[in-house]
Image (cartoon, grey):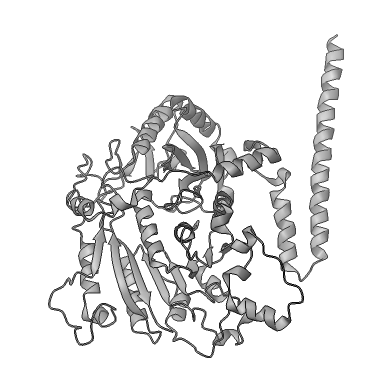
């Protein structure tokens, strides 16, 4: 009897091994087939990329496939229609831009119990009275800037006061509860040998000691709730935090992102490991316990494997990110209109104060003239570009097109999902929604004239497009050719030198109007890649870099003049100001 069972079990194991070998064999054959097909196209880079993309996105090569439920075509169609339904806005723009509300917020206090020791906030009262604001007021009121400002008459350049009122300051959100994204360090509660769980917080001032901030006043309530759940869960399953002195332990940092519409949390656990396998079994136990402690809080849970000895919180390589539970994306409503969503995940950049940035994005959209052709560099997931597109879609002159670009490849999937969430009336040309009857026997000269005229009725397809490129590469690829509006939102170091050089070039009247690189009748080295731009909107998160770039622009031969400058206290409690500077020129 036992011998018969042994034989049966052996046969079953042999069958399973043969089945796996067949599956692996087919995968190898498919890979070899792809490689042989690649050899057929030695010079066709686009074809090679297409074949490799198909191979990477096939089910057997999708490392997230086990988390995804397969959907029928009917379910996919139903989900797409669900995305396009009207939705409410999170931010009240009129209230947040009210002068009375703003006046009160500028003298408000954060009132946080952790202020005396925490390094997160530098000021607890009168949040707008910070050095960065005063420096900005002095800079924009200086004689060097006033002579290039559109509001200053000739001969009235010198001003006796250090602030002539040109630089407007706004606190676009409440001064408490505004932070919807937090990165916190992990540390042992007592010591690593005690294995009594972790504490989470920021470093104490002038030290490398982690200070818990369970009642932080600037955090969204869901962040503080998530931290409490983490402390309880790590204690229950005895999770060890990484210690720099001994280089032992696993959990290094956490990132918490709040989806405002649902108040659920996307949690990223940063682990001292090279691969996901090295995190086990501690990570699996922690995730299971988190879901038990707070079953309704988690929108998703991720792990980032970072075994680097540097101070970088994340390892940015795509293969170091692992989704362990929940959805791939957080959803945030586009801050204007009643349709469309922006999609974020831990691999994409997301603002810490979404309420405040909603206001800033709408202010950028109002600076874009109706019917414009818009190029956005450093676009991220397309926050500013999509806000402008949706705002003007309701008017008589929608934007002709919006070209976005960014170097982070993870943004492209977010862009595509946002496009899927928009109705055709917003994202597509009218001729695509209601195709006109095609005229027969169109001559080549008529066709070229139609293309150069750029008439709305003669365009087809979508108004918005995206390219994964650095800003300088996108500019040299012709993304701003034909654009009359250029929007940039660079990192703190400011514009890339190549981008600044192009913006400082004088208008070239000999350069023909063209919307693509191939249509310009000049050599590449003679092309002014921003020749048609007449409105330049600079969104800055680093004022020192903005000041340097502004000096270069205003003193160049490009003819730029400063129309307006507005400061946004996006992070009340800090000495930081986000700035919108709008430049204009005649060409």
Apparent side of residue 571 relative to residue 107 in the rendered image (left or right) = right
Residue 239 in picture, x, y percent from top left: 45, 31
- From the viewer's perspective, is 114 left or right of 424? left
Q: Residue at coordinates 55% horizontally, 44% vertically from top-left? A: 83
- Residue at left 72%, top 47%? 58
Looking at the image, can residue 547 be seen?
yes
Residue situated furthest top in the rendering: 1
In the displayed orientation, state which residue is furthest to the left. 160
Q: Tell which of 224 and 22 is nearer to you.
A: 224
Q: Position of residue 436 (x, y in %)?
A: 67, 64
Q: Residue at x 75, y 58 (%)?
A: 51
Q: Compared with residue 335, is residue 60 higher up or lower down, i.e. above or below?
A: above
Number of disc labels:
0
Quarter of the picture containing the N terminus is: top right
Q: Nearer the viewer, residue 205 or 528?
A: 528
- Residue 108 in the image: x percent, y percent? 19, 48
**Position above or below: 157 against 197:** below
Q: Is residue 176 left or right of residue 540?
A: left
Please tell me which residue lies in front, 330 or 400: 400
For residue 191, side relative to residue 295 (left or right): left
Query: Where in the figure is residue 140, as x and y percent of width and height?
Result: 25, 73
Instruction: Say which quadrant the C terminus sits in.
Output: bottom left
From this viewpoint, is residue 518 visible? no
The residue sitting at 36% across, 47% down in the picture is 91
Q: Quadrant of residue 5?
A: top right
């Amino acid at each position: 009897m036992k011998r018969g069972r042994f034989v049966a079990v052996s046969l079953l194991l042999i069958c399973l091994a043969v089945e796996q070998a067949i599956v692996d064999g087919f995968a190898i054959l498919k890979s070899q087939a792809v490689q042989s097909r690649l050899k057929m196209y030695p010079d066709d880079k686009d074809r090679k990329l297409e074949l490799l993309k198909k191979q990477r996105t096939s089910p057997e090569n999708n490392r997230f496939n086990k988390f995804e439920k397969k959907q029928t075509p009917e379910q996919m169609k139903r989900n797409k229609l669900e995305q396009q339904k009207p939705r409410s806005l999170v931010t009240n723009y009129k209230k947040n831009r009210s002068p009375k509300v703003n006046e009160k917020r500028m003298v408000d206090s954060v009132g946080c119990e952790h202020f005396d020791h925490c390094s997160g906030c530098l000021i607890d009262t009168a949040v707008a009275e910070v050095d960065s604001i005063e420096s900005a007021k002095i800079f924009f009121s200086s004689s060097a800037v006033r002579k290039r400002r559109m509001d200053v008459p000739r001969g009235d350049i010198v001003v006796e006061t250090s602030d002539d009122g040109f630089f407007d300051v706004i606190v676009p959100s409440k001064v408490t509860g505004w932070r919807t994204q937090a990165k916190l360090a992990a540390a042992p509660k007592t010591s690593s040998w005690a294995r009594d769980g972790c504490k989470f917080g920021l470093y104490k001032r002038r030290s490398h000691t982690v200070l818990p901030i369970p009642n932080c006043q600037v955090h969204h309530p869901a962040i503080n709730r998530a931290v409490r759940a983490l402390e309880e869960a790590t204690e229950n399953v005895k999770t060890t935090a990484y210690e720099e002195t001994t280089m032992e332990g696993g959990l290094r940092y956490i990132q918490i992102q709040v989806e405002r519409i649902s108040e659920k949390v996307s949690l990223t656990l940063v682990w001292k490991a090279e691969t996901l396998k090295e995190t086990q079994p501690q990570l699996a136990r922690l995730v299971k316990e988190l879901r038990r402690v707070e079953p309704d809080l988690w929108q998703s849970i991720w792990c980032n494997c970072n075994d680097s000895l540097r101070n970088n919180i994340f390892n940015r390589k795509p293969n170091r990110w692992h989704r362990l539970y929940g959805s791939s994306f957080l959803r945030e409503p586009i801050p204007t209109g009643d349709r469309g969503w922006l999609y974020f995940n831990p691999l994409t950049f997301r603002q810490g104060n979404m309420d405040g940035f909603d206001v800033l994005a709408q202010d950028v959209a109002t600076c874009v003239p109706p019917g414009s052709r818009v190029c956005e560099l450093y676009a991220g997931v397309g926050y500013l570009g999509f806000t402008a597109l949706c705002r003007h879609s309701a008017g008589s002159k929608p934007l002709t097109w919006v070209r976005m670009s960014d170097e982070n490849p993870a943004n492209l999937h977010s862009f595509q999902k946002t496009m899927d969430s928009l109705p055709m009336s917003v994202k597509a040309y009218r001729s695509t929604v209601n195709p006109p009857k095609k005229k027969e026997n169109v001559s080549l000269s008529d066709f070229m004239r139609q293309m150069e005229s750029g008439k709305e009725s003669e365009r087809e397809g979508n108004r918005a497009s995206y390219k994964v490129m650095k800003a300088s590469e996108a500019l040299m690829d012709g993304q701003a050719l034909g654009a009359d509006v250029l929007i940039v939102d660079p990192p703190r170091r400011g514009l890339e030198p190549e981008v600044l050089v192009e913006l400082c070039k004088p208008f070239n009247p000999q350069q023909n109007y063209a919307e693509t690189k191939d249509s310009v009748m000049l050599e590449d080295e003679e092309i002014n890649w921003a020749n048609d731009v007449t409105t330049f909107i600079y969104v800055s998160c680093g004022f020192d870099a903005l000041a340097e770039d502004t000096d270069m622009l205003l003193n160049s031969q490009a003819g730029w003049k400063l129309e307006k400058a507005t400061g946004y206290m996006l992070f009340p409690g800090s000495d930081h100001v986000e700035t919108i500077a709008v430049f204009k020129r005649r060409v």
